[in-house]
Amino acid sequence: MSATNTAVQPPADAAAPVRHPEAPAPGEPVGSHYANCFGCGPDQPHGLHLAARAGEGVDITAEFTVRPEHQGAPGLAHGGVLATALDEALGALNWILRVISVTGRLETDYLRPVPVGSVLHLSARVTARAGRKIYATAEGRLDGPDGPVAVRADALFIEVKVDHFIENGRQEEIQAVMHDPDVRRQARAFEVNP
Ligand SMILES: CCCCCCCC(=O)SCCNC(=O)CCNC(=O)[C@H](O)C(C)(C)COP(=O)(O)OP(=O)(O)OC[C@H]1O[C@@H](n2cnc3c(N)ncnc32)[C@H](O)[C@@H]1OP(=O)(O)O
């Protein structure tokens, strides 16, 4: 990592984000980027099973139900799990930009305890872009989409090529994914249709 600017707030000359013309329509599910993803994978038994929907701008919404296995203190969600939910909501913005990016930095504020059994209403939006850097923010509210904010995060995502995963992921899982034609087509489409 170069050390020029690691802030999660965009510089003054950053560009406004643009919704990709082929992004899912507002209200449509954005889908899971990987069936075994801990955040959004439908086949991941231990996962959070977040299902994000596209918003009208460069944004998404999702709900996360806090289950007993997500506890940190008795009856309360673990902070790391809540950070994961925010991270995944932010990652779903890739589908709105139609860009592949990964979390570089995630700064989380915990404002209220989140009880087990509660539904966290998540929203995330891209605030700016500067080269490969994507600035985004997310929040999770209790008691409905307009309820009090319990957790929030500012993040810096960095655009990467598909090779980032091919070169760094464990070969066992990479090979399994490479043999799935749907996944391959989807990944390459993100790269060649900027
Ligand atoms: C398919 C999508 C899945 C989404 C799932 C949900 C989101 C996730 O959890 S992703 C998984 C967690 N994240 C990761 O594993 C990423 C691990 N990190 C890496 O691979 C690398 O550090 C990576 C790719 C982020 C950056 O490396 P590299 O491509 O060499 O970029 P590099 O040239 O160093 O930096 C580019 C710019 O980003 C900035 N930057 C890079 N990393 C950071 C960081 N951690 N914090 C702040 N700024 C950073 C640099 O300062 C640089 O800025 P500038 O252009 O102003 O000089």
Image (cartoon, rainbow, N blue to C red):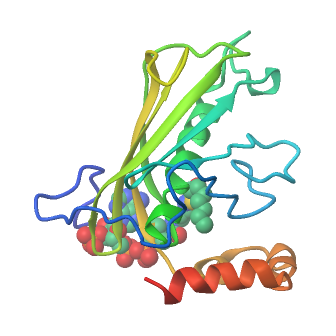
Where in the figure is residue 60, as x and y percent of width and height?
49, 47
* Of residues 17 and 150, the one drawn nearer to the viewer in this rendering: 17
- Residue 84 in sight here: yes
Q: Quadrant of ligand 1?
A: bottom left
Quadrant of image for the N terminus: bottom left
Asked if 168 appears above or below 30 in the picture, the reply is below
Q: Is residue 9 left or right of residue 144?
A: left
* Of residues 114 and 72, the one drawn nearer to the viewer in this rendering: 114
Q: For residue 142, what is the image quadrant?
A: top right
Asked if 139 appears above or below 45 in the picture, the reply is above
Quadrant of image for the C terminus: bottom left
| Label total for image | 0
Where in the figure is residue 148, as x and y percent of width and height?
43, 15
Where in the figure is residue 150, as x and y percent of width and height?
48, 20
Q: Is residue 66 left or right of residue 45?
A: left
- Residue 163 in sight here: no
Where in the figure is residue 14, as x and y percent of width and height?
18, 64
Q: For residue 163, what is the image quadrant?
A: bottom right
Residue with the most extreme top position: 74
Q: Is residue 64 left or right of residue 103?
A: right
Residue with the most extreme bottom position: 192
Q: Residue at x 81, y 26 (%)?
A: 69
Q: Residue at x 49, y 71 (%)?
A: 98
* Of residues 41 and 77, the one drawn nearer to the viewer in this rendering: 41
Q: Residue at x 74, y 56 (%)?
A: 37
Q: Is residue 41 left or right of residue 100?
A: right
Q: Residue at x 84, y 83 (%)?
A: 175
